[in-house]
Image (cartoon, helix red, strand yellow):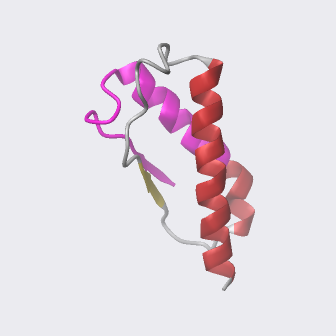
Amino acid sequence: MGALVPKRWARRAVTRNAIKRQIYNVSQDFEPQLPAAAHVVRLRAGFDRKQFISATSDLLKQAVRAELQQLFAAGRGKAGA
């Protein structure tokens, strides 16, 4: 599993690292359901610093986790088809 979090979308290193940790944690939950292949998750939109003030806030963690779960669920559906 690879994770790309461009500085353009998450300026602070602590935010990028927190998002990457979420990617790796959620991917472990879906790993048995995904085909054996190289998977890359790339952040394509930013998280607003006004809404998510702290990189370690529970609100940011929940938002990232919810989005990742939707992504992996959709990927699992495509892999099974």
Q: In which quarter of the image is the C terminus?
A: bottom right
Which residue sits at x=61%, y=77%?
78
Position of residue 7 in the picture relative to residue 71 (left or right)? left
Which residue occupies the extreme left position in the image? 8
Which residue sits at x=60%, y=68%?
75
Position above or below: 45 against 51 = below
Q: Can residue 30 be seen in this view?
A: yes
Position of residue 19 in the picture relative to residue 79 (left or right)? left
Which residue sits at x=45%, y=28%?
17
Which residue sits at x=60%, y=35%?
63
Q: Does the magenta stretch include residue 74?
A: no
Instruction: Decide which of 2, 74 is in the foreground and name it.
Output: 74
User: The magenta stretch spans which residues?
Assistant: 1-27
Residue 37 location, x and y as percent? 53, 71
Q: Is residue 27 visible?
A: no
Q: In which quarter of the image is residue 40?
A: bottom left
Position above or below: 55 against 2 = above
